[in-house]
Image (spheres, coloured by chain):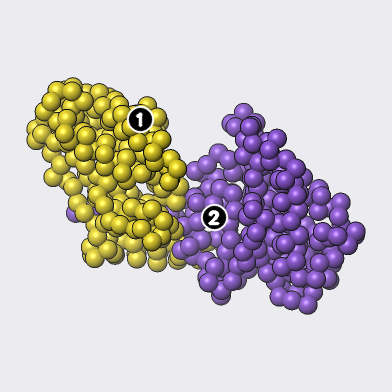
Chain colours: A yellow, B purple
């Protein structure tokens, strides 16, 4: 799972925020919640989820399945929008979406996308990846190269290239990229890496990809 | 200039239409008008423009500059929307946009984008290409590889790859692709080519690009 860090309310209100929140108990559960949309809405949902941890109600640390975790995030989103939407709408879009992925002991890893209506869908063998937010620029490279049998490291590389495409074409997405490589059954978030603009791997990946892609296009025959 | 041929009003109303209309007098002017948005709106604008040819009013065959041609298309769009918008809005978005490009004798080739408000912008050395409609999937390859000193044939190839990216990632765009390669000063549309799914060049371009891109991604080092 990966998220960028750019938040904007117009070109003169650009800030850097975290959009990946982890709810984790080592050896038992790792739930990553990725946010997109109205920042006040997403932060309110995350803070409410944090405040409910340990209460047993709307509690991501207590739910028995990732399906229940997705429902909890969706319900919390509905609560926040019910309170805020009418007040926010005159100024802008109050809506938000989330990706909820990870693993809870007793079931395999799972991945969900929560829509602004609070309902949600799950990834599966035929829809191998889910995107939310500014999705279109980065989708072609995922459509072309992601395969189900790809290693986690190679999938991570493709994900970073997808973010690079979006960053180059759209001001609303920017570094650092938070990348969580979660190994099924590990029940730990130690695979979390942050890629800033200064990261040597990220910098070389982006420049090598760009150079080689330009060469590739040049090598293809031209129309008569 | 290039346009696809897919029109849709939901997944069960998909049709194939022409979105590139030419207003041409050999040796004197070539004006290509590319349509996006509500099909009833765009067809009404184009039919009105055709009916005005030779009248001297809102007449693409009479205007002295491509700037005037762009204004004529924008004004016609405003007229159509003033008549139709209120009736169409309960059923869907009545809006439309256009690209207007080509050359009129006495000035260089020019390219404009007309927004649904009827106003417009022009391409220049710092914004070398304009897109409208389903633009995002195909933008990264243009951002990465289009250069001002590129040959018309190479730019045509990049344009076709950009359309391929969009076609693979989005149902609302489809073949045939109408591609107009206009040589400045030629005042003819003889560079117009149609690429269907059965076209051997287009087929090979898409499959070679896809294979080589997958190989390229595989060749790049993976994160530790």
Do circles 1 and 2 both sit on a common chain?
no
Crowd tier of the residue under label 2, counting other residues whose Cα lies within 10 Å: few below 14, some 14–19, many 20 or above: many
Q: Secondary structure at mark 2?
A: helix
Rounded to the nearest angstrom, the CA distance separating label 1 from label 2 is: 45 Å
Residue A151 sits in quarter: top left
Q: Quadrant of the N terminus of chain A?
A: top left
| Residue A77 visible | no
Q: Residues within 10 Å of mark 1 (few under 14, many from 20)?
A: few
Q: Chain of mark 2?
A: B
Question: Which residue is labeled 2 in the image?
Answer: B161
Q: What residue sits 66% from the left and 65% below the top?
A: B111
Residue A175 lies, in percent from the top left, at: 29, 58
State the residue position of label 1.
A82
Residue B143 in percent (x, y) is at 48, 62
Q: Nearer the viewer, mark 1 or mark 2?
A: 1
State which chain disc 1 sits on.
A
- The structure residue drawn at horizontal position 71% and vertical position 62%, both measured from the top left corner, is B70
Give the answer, above or below, for where B189 lies relative to A131: below
Q: Residue furthest right?
A: B55
Which picture quadrant has residue B32? bottom right
Horizontal side, residue A52 vs residue A141: left or right: left
Q: Nearer the viewer, residue A115 or A158?
A: A115
**Residue nearest the viewer, comparing A131 with A129:** A131
For this rendering, which residue is in front, A201 or A188? Answer: A188
Q: Is residue B51 shown to the viewer in this render?
A: yes
Residue reaching furthest bottom?
B106
Q: Which quadrant of the figure contains the C terminus of chain A?
A: bottom right
Residue A61 image point, x, y percent: 15, 29
């Amino acid at each position: 799972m990966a998220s960028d860090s750019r938040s904007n309310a117009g070109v003169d209100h650009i800030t850097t925020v975290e959009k990946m929140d982890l709810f984790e108990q080592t050896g038992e559960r790792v739930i990553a919640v990725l946010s997109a949309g109205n920042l006040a809405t997403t932060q309110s949902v995350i803070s409410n989820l944090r405040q409910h941890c340990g209460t047993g109600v709307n509690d991501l640390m207590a739910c028995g399945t990732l399906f229940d975790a997705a429902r909890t995030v969706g319900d919390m989103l509905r609560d926040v929008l019910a309170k805020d939407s009418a007040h926010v709408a005159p100024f802008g879009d109050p809506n938000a979406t989330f990706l909820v992925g990870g693993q809870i002991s007793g079931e395999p890893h799972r991945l969900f996308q929560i829509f602004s209506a609070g309902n949600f869908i799950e990834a599966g063998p035929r829809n191998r990846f889910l995107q939310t937010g500014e999705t279109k620029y980065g989708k072609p490279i995922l459509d072309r190269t992601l395969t189900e049998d790809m290693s986690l490291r190679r999938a991570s590389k493709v994900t970073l290239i997808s973010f690079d495409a979006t960053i180059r074409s759209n001001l609303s997405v920017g570094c650092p990229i938070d990348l969580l490589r979660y190994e099924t059954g590990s029940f730990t978030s130690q695979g979390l890496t942050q890629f800033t603009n200064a990261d040597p791997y990220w910098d070389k990946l982006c420049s090598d990809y760009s150079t080689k892609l330009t060469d590739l296009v040049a090598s293809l025959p031209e129309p008569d």
